[in-house]
Amino acid sequence: MANLHPMDELKEKLKAILEVVPQGSEIMYVDYPVYNNGGDVLIMKGTEKFFRDYNIKVRARYSAMDFPAKLNIPDNWIIVCHGGGNFGDLYANHQNLREKVVRDFPSHRIVVMPQTIHFESERKADMAAALFNNHPDLHIFVRDTRSYDFATAKFHKCGVRMCPDMAHQLWPLQPTAMPVNDVLYFLRTDIETVAGQQQFDREADDSNRLDWDTMFTPLEVRGIVYFQKFYRLDKKLGGPLPTRTFWYKYTDYLMNKAIGLFSSYKEVRTSRLHGHILSCLLDMPNVVIDNSYGKNSQYYETWTAGISKASLHGASGSKLEQPS
């Protein structure tokens, strides 16, 4: 045990979830991703592997696109909400679904898988807290100390625990390509981008600078859009289409592409949390820079600072070599 890899230790910490979702449980998995954010897809793959590894029986699955307006489920099912970084008011669609689940199922155990929590609005945070605190069996896992402090203060009647991201259940991932390129710059282009990313922006050339939405080809992105249309149609028709089965197979393809891309580089420099986590899962050198509200630095300082091949850009003692 003395030589246990830090990633093995992080994977082991996910067993804390079994305290509220025991082995053999019957569950409904809610809010799995149907969009082109590979980070959330990586979380989904880790979550599904966790379910398989611990014989947790998934009796129903719903995304934000096909969750029914009214739904009856057996009393013994546990409702498990997808983890990630959308707990708060930046991504209203997903927060609204979580709040609907809490309102609609007051007698079921509800478990929120590891999340980063961030509210811009104190009023919205208080409204969510009032709803969540009114539920008698609600459990929230968080991915960093800042989210933990926030959740224990606001959601004081809920069970709150710290836990790494669900993608760690995938450890170890095997590289699928030879590292023939030097540095992959995997950088955000959305609302979570920070000015400090500019150094990486200057270093990167177009051929080695990607994000989730540019890693996939226009045809692959069009495929995701078509799946979203099928989900809407499936919901309208009452669920006769095998949409989820095909979507899960498509996400296998997308993840294999991401693993192949990362494997083909010697190092990754990223402002995407799951650019950092995927690099760690592949046991490859990587440097992570923060996002707009501290998600990446909080995660690094809470979980991955002990990984020798990972570093936080701008942290005391960190060294960033210029790409050759």
Image (cartoon, grey):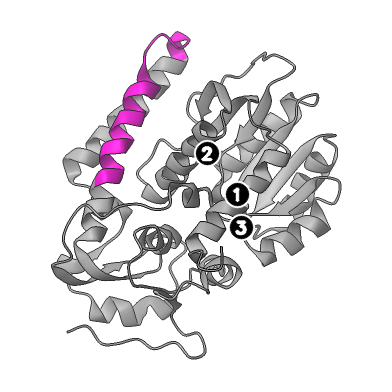
Q: Nearer the viewer, residue 96 or 134?
A: 134
Of the two numbered discs 2 and 1 on the same chain, state the one appearing first in sequence.
1
The answer for how far apart the CA atoms under marks 2 and 1 are is: 9 Å
Magenta residues (range):
236-256
Of the two numbered discs 2 and 3 on the same chain, state the one appearing first in sequence.
2
Left or right: 112 in relation to 230:
right
Q: Which residue is mark 2?
A: 50
Residue at 48%, 35% in the rendered image: 48
Element marked by disc 2: helix
The picture places residue 318, in percent across and down from the top left corner, at 44, 87
Amino acid under disc 3: Arg
> Decide: marks 2, 3 in contact (CB < 8 A)?
no
Quarter of the rendering occupied by the N terminus: bottom right
- Look at the picture and state if 30 lies above or below 143: above
Q: Nearer the viewer, residue 163 or 187?
A: 163
Q: Nearer the viewer, residue 296 or 277?
A: 277
Element marked by disc 1: helix
Element marked by disc 3: loop
Residue at 78%, 41% in the rendered image: 132
Of the two numbered discs 1 and 3 on the same chain, state the one appearing first in sequence.
1
> Decide: marks 2, 1 in contact (CB < 8 A)?
yes
Quarter of the rendering occupied by the C terminus: bottom left
Q: Which residue is mark 1?
A: 14
The picture places residue 112, in percent across and down from the top left corner, at 65, 41
Badge number at residue 143: 3
The picture places residue 249, in percent across and down from the top left corner, at 31, 29
The answer for how far apart the CA atoms under marks 2 and 3 are is: 17 Å
Amino acid under disc 2: Phe
